Image (tube, rainbow, N blue to C red):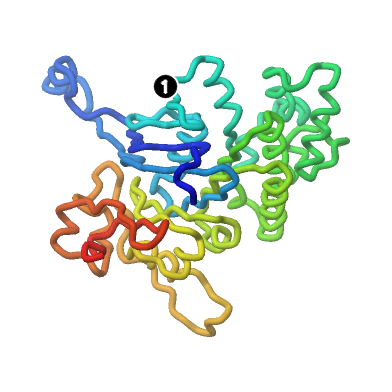
Amino acid sequence: MDSNVIPIVELDQVSKTFGKASGEGAFERWAQRLQLTRKTSVTHAVDRVDLRIQRGEVVGLVGESGCGKSTLGRMVAGLMPASSGQVRIDGTAVDELSAAERHAARLKIQMIFQDPSASLNPRLRVDRIVGEGARLHGLTDSAGFDDYVSAQLQRAGLNPSLRQRYPHQFSGGQRQRIGIARALAVQPQLLVCDESVAALDVSIQAQILNLFMDLRDELGLTYLFISHDLGVVEHLCDRVIVMYLGRVVESAPVEELFGAANHPYTQALLAQIPRFDVRSTRYDAIKGEIPSPLNPPSGCHFHPRCPHAFARCREQAPPLREVAPNHLSACHLNDQI
């Protein structure tokens, strides 16, 4: 990957917290002493993440539930502001964009959600769901509205004659295609797909994944593909980022990561993938449970579950360092590299 090419999206030391630390102000401390308010806790959903997505890439983002994948995806899509750090679009910080530039940046990145039923307005017909955003932003007018909507539905693999129906009249796979058509209608450059096939039957999953790849070739799209299915990620992605409890623990090209994973957490995840060439094996769950982001472990967040942990792991958070070309890992076992 050429480091001189400006990424379409760049995150520098981005964090996202929810809640507020107890006693941040004099009034809060006074109210807590009088037991007028409850103590509040801070959830560290994303913790100082660096991320760069180049044009045309398909980047996979994996990790267990609760590791911060969806929160990170929403920050990339502009649906959620970062608590700290900097988000840049085409090399310019979002905070420095004018209103018009920020508006254009929001259109450039669209999100496709996990549950197609929950992400579509049940009171609107499909033509309005797909085309209203495009009309609002001047990408089509009233005269060309029907033709524009029909083109987006056809591109997403749906019959345009169904555009007057409501979402409940479609199957789950068809509803996901409606969501894809809605995203395509505003002519994005990057799609953030948040577990966008997880709620579908396996046969329908394959159809939607093939559609994503066809759209990549046809429209030159870039993807951030959030998934817990490592088999899907291996098949689709160019590069994989592994998150654990809000932090990136490993990042590598897909062949490098699946062939020579470095971080113990990544190795444990890959060990759970069923393989056709292995006749009989025992799949053991990763030791322990993922800790609460309300009270993450000190040092390396993975140390309570890591079979290789030693004293330093409990005290210091390991930095991401290059262990091979374009292969980064955050583990103290790499200190001698």
Q: Residue at x 77, y 21 (%)?
A: 140
Relative depth, front residue between 213 and 173: 213
Question: Vertical placement of 152 versus 263: above or below?
Answer: above
- Decide if residue 114 is in sight here: no
Q: Label 1, secondary structure: give it.
A: helix
In the rendered image, residue 256, in percent from the top left (x then y), is placed at 46, 65
Q: Report whether 204 appears left or right of 42.
A: right
Q: Report whether 287 appears left or right of 88.
A: left
In the rendered image, residue 27, in percent from the top left (x then y), is placed at 17, 15
Question: Vertical placement of 29 versus 204: above or below?
Answer: above
Q: Which residue is drawn at 30% across and 62% down?
A: 288
Question: Which amino acid, mark 1?
Answer: Asp
Question: Vertical placement of 168 versus 25: above or below?
Answer: below
Q: Which residue is tagged 1?
A: 95
Extreme residue toward the right, this view: 161
- Decide if residue 241 is in sight here: yes
Extreme residue toward the bottom, this view: 279
Question: Vertical placement of 98 versus 261: above or below?
Answer: above
Local crowd size for mark 1, using a 10 Å CA cut-off: few (<14), some (14–19), many (≥20)? few
Check the picture and name the quadrant holding the C terminus: bottom left
In the rendered image, residue 63, in percent from the top left (x then y), is placed at 43, 54
Q: Report whether 120 appears left or right of 48.
A: right
Q: Report whether 48 appears left or right of 273.
A: left
